């Protein structure tokens, strides 16, 4: 994790999630940007591999 500014941080790594609809694993390998929204940091690229929106949050 790298803090880019007061409101944004980047995760240079993988986020692995299992998609409930088809049970397949989806891995986000690109540089993932999170934006500070209140008490959480929310992933900005919300569309998963099946085309649905996922909210991935990091809580303080």
Image: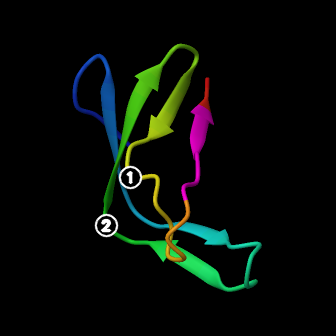
Left or right of residue 14, residue 6 in this image = left
Q: Which residue is drawn at 40% across and 63% down?
A: 13
Crowd class of label 1 (few under 14; some 14 to 19; many from 20; radius 10 Å)? some
Q: Is residue 17 above or below residue 35?
A: below
Q: Residue at x 54, y 55 (%)?
A: 53
Left or right of residue 30, residue 54 in this image = right
- Main SS category, magenta section: loop
Left or right of residue 49, residue 45 in this image = left
Q: In which quarter of the image is the C terminus?
A: top right
Q: Is residue 22 above or below residue 54?
A: below
Residue sitting at the far front = 51
**Among the 4 quarters of the image, the one containing residue 33:** top left
Secondary structure of residue under mark 2: loop
**Residue 19, x across and y down, in percent:** 69, 73
**Residue 4, x across and y down, in percent:** 22, 31
Q: What segment is highlighted magenta in the picture?
A: 53-58
| Closer mark to the observer between disc 2 and disc 1 | 1
**Residue 26, x across and y down, in percent:** 56, 77
**Among the 4 quarters of the image, the one containing residue 40:** top right
Residue 8, disc: none
Label 2, label 1: how many angstroms apart (C-alpha)? 10 Å
Badges 2 and 1: C-beta atoms under 8 Å apart? yes
Residue sitting at the far left = 4
Q: In this view, does 45 lie above or below 24?
A: above
Give the residue pinned by disc 2: 30
Q: In this view, does 34 lie above or below 22?
A: above
Q: Which residue is drawn at 75% across and 83% down?
A: 23
**Residue 8, x across and y down, in percent:** 31, 29
Residue 57 counted in the magenta span: yes
Give the residue pinned by disc 1: 45
Q: In which quarter of the image is the N terminus?
A: top left
């Amino acid at each position: 994790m790298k803090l880019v500014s007061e409101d944004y941080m980047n995760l240079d790594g993988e986020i692995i999630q299992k998609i409930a609809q088809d049970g397949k694993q989806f891995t986000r390998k690109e540089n993932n940007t999170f934006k500070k929204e209140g008490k959480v940091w929310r992933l900005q690229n919300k569309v998963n591999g099946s085309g649905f929106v996922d909210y991935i949050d990091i809580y303080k």
